[in-house]
Amino acid sequence: MPEALLYWLSWPLLVGGLLFFAAGSLGLLRFPDVYSRLHALTKADTLGLGLVVAGLSCRADSLLEVGQMLVIWLLVLASGATACQLLARQAREEHGDD
Amino acid sequence: MTEWLLDAVLALLLLALAGGALHARNRYAGVLLFIAFGLVLALIWARLGAPDLALAEAAIGAGLTGVLLLAALARQPAGSGAEGVSFARHRLAAAAVLVPLLMILLQGLDPLAEQRSPLPELATGALGQSGVSHPVTAVLLNYRAWDTLLELAVLLLALLGARQLGPARFEVERPWPLLRAWSRSLAPLLLLAGGYLLWSGSSAPGGAFQAGSLLAAGVVLLRLAGVLPALRWSFWPLRLLVLLGLLLFLAVAIACAWFGAGWLVYPDGWAKPLILVIEVAATLSIAASLSLLVVGEAREASA
C-alpha cells in the first residue's frame, strides 16, 4: 500500500517540476533583461530539479539512489546559485547599473 | 514506446544542435551550441550503453574543448564576428569532398550492421590475463596499449604546438570572492571524482583521460579564481609532470621489449601493477597538459 501511495504522490511532484522547467525556459526566452532571465533560469534549476528529484525519490528502489539524487540536486543548487551571481555581476560591470 | 521517443528526441536534438553550431550567427553562439552538442552526444553514448565514451565526451568533448574554444574566442580581437563564415562556394567544395568520403566510409561500416563482430568475445575471453576486469580498460591499456601510448604522444605534440604559436596571454582579473569560495569548495570534490574515476577504471567505466580532464578542470577553476599561482613552463617539475606519462609508458614498453616477450607485452602477473602505474602517471600528465593548454602561463617575460 505505501508503494502505491508513493507512486501516486510522485506524479504531482514530477508534473510540478516539469512545469517549473517549462516556465523557466519560457522566461529565459521571453524576459526582457539579463536579471529577469537569470531569475527565471535559476528558479527552473533549483525548484524544478528539486521537485523532479523529490518525485523520482518516491519511485526509487533504494535509499542509495535517493542519496545520489539529493547530492546531485545540492551540487546543481550551489553551482546554479554561484553561476547566477557571477553572470549578474558580469552583466552589471558590462552595462552599468541599469 | 517512451524509450523510443526519448531516443528520437535526442537524435533530432543532436542534429539540430550540430546544424546550429555550424550556422550560428556569431561565433560565441556557435561555441555554446557546440558545448550543448557535446553534452547531448554524451547522453546518446550513455543511451547506447557506452558509458566510457559518454564520460570522455562529456569531460573532454564538451567540457575541455568548450573551454578551449571560449578561451580562443576571448583572444580574438573584438568585432571580428560573423564575417567570412559562410560562402556558398566553400560549402559546395566541402560537400564535394565529404559526400564521396561519407559513401566510402559507410561501406566500411557495413560489416558492423551484422552485429557479429568477433572482437567483443576475444576481448572478454582474454580478460583473465589482462590484469583488469573492465574490457574497455583492457583494450586501452593491454591489447591496444600502443594506441594509447601514441595518444599521449599526440597530446604532448598538441601542447608543444600550441606553445609554438606564442605565449598564451592569460591574465586573471581580480577574482570575485564568490568565485574564490566556490572554487575552493568545488576543487576537493573534483579531486575526489577524478581519483574515483581513475581507480574505478580497472573494473568499471572510467580511466586516465576522464580522470585527467576532471583534475585539469579543478586546476583551471582554481587558476581562474586566483587561488593557484600562474603555471610556469620554466618550472621544471611541471615539465616533468607533462612528460611523465609518456616517459613511463615508453620505459615500460622498452623494458618489456628488452627483458620480456615483446613490445608492450606485459610479463605474467605484472599486468595489473604496470597498468595502474601507467594510468596514474598518464592521469597526472593529461591533467598537467590540459591545464597548460587552457590556462597557459603568465607572461613569457616572467619566465
Image (cartoon, rainbow, N blue to C red):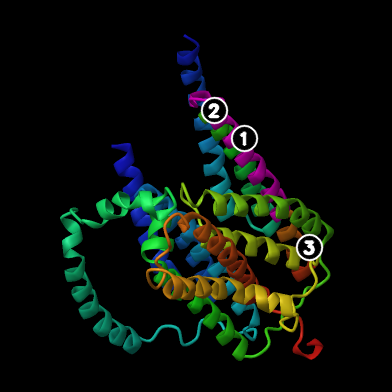
Alpha carbon of mark 2 to alpha carbon of mark 1: how far? 9 Å
Q: Amino acid at mark 3?
A: Asp
Depth check: B67 or A95 in front?
B67
Image quarter where the C terminus of chain A lies is bottom right
Q: Are marks 2 and 1 on the same chain?
A: yes
The numbered mark, 3 or 2, whose residue comes first in the sequence reads: 2
Kindly identify the residue that appears in the image at 54 percent across and 28 percent down.
Answer: A57
User: Mark 2 sits on what residue?
Assistant: A57
Q: Which residues are magenta?
A: A57-84
SS class of the residue under badge 2? Answer: helix
Marks 2/1 in contact by CB < 8 Å: the verdict is yes
* Residue A65 lies within the magenta run: yes
| Horizontal arrangement in the rendering, residue B135 relative to residue B191 (left or right) | left
Dot in front, 1 or 3: 1
Q: Chain of mark 2?
A: A
User: Mark 3 sits on what residue?
Assistant: A98
List x then y, in percent, for residue B14.
38, 59
Mark carried by residue A70? 1
Kindly identify the residue that appears in the image at 19 percent across and 76 percent down.
Answer: B104
Q: Chain of mark 3?
A: A
* Residue B113 lies within the magenta run: no
Alpha carbon of mark 1 to alpha carbon of mark 3: how far? 37 Å
